[in-house]
Amino acid sequence: EPEVTQTPSHQVTQMGQEVILRCVPISNHLYFYWYRQILGQKVEFLVSFYNNEISEKSEIFDDQFSVERPDGSNFTLKIRSTKLEDSAMYFCASSEPQTGPGEQFFGPGTRLTVL
Amino acid sequence: GENVEQHPSTLSVQEGDSAVIKCTYSDSASNYFPWYKQELGKRPQLIIDIRSNVGEKKDQRIAVTLNKTAKHFSLHITETQPEDSAVYFCAASIGASKIIFGSGTRLSIRP
């Protein structure tokens, strides 16, 4: 069964450094998403991406964040200058092309630790 | 913006009993309501979902009900088993571009 994959599984970085989190969505999916989950808290929507552009973004997704689909398979989240409070689990998700909402398939997550 | 409230935050039930988790949403335009189960250190996994044109949906021991007028939806798990222990999240979305999650319910099944 196809799955969303994410790399790396754990990223440790120094405050102020740039990080890029990588995701490979399921191949025939057209909607892509990033979420974050601070330890012990709820899953928070960051951004959705469709047809090579941002479809919607949350208040969390400020100018420090950007997303890109650099080729036909990868979907990346970049954090330009990391802060301590960016430490969290970051989940990528994708969903099938539909006329309405449908199941989002989550990747295993990247645990980001900012020191 | 859309907000989803979820109760209770923790729930402990005897094995074999039923568990009920309740959620309310704020935006009446929400039309899709998934429920996710998350085990410790793992990704959220969809267990059941319901669309706004349906009032109830059942899949074996799991059922979800939706009251659009009251903007409430609930998850019911019957005949609970130890493997049901996890954190459960409700969510609501308008269209395909955004899902807002509730704060989660930690369900523990007592043997």
Image (spheres, coloured by chain):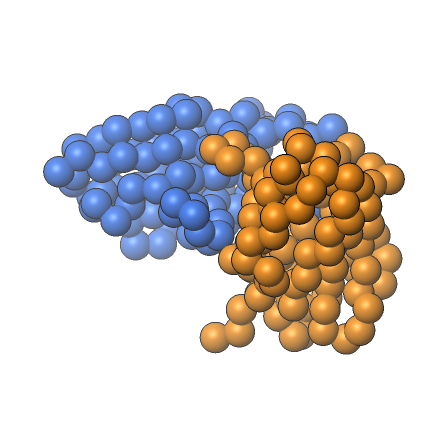
Q: Quadrant of the N terminus of chain B?
A: top right
Q: Is B87 situated left or right of B2 in this image? A: left
Q: Is A62 situated left or right of B54 in this image? A: right
The answer to whether one can see residue B22 in this image is: yes
Residue at screen point 48% across, 44% down: B35
Position above or below: A87 against A77: above
Residue at screen point 77% across, 75% down: A72
Q: Is B40 situated left or right of A29 in this image? A: left
Position above or below: B59 against A15: below
Q: Nearer the viewer, residue A27 or A69?
A: A69
Q: Nearer the viewer, residue B43 or B104?
A: B43
State which chain is coloured orange: A
Residue at screen point 53% across, 74% down: A2
Residue A21: % across, % down:
68, 56
Residue at screen point 78% across, 33% down: A59
The answer to whether one can see residue A48 in this image is: no
Position above or below: B11 against B64: above
Q: In this view, which residue lies farthest toward the left?
A: B111
State which chain is coloured blue: B
Q: Nearer the viewer, residue A67 or A48?
A: A67
Residue B93: % across, % down:
65, 42
Q: Is B98 situated left or right of A41 in this image? A: right
Residue A79: % across, % down:
77, 46
Residue A34: % across, % down:
68, 50
Q: Nearer the viewer, residue A62 or B61?
A: A62
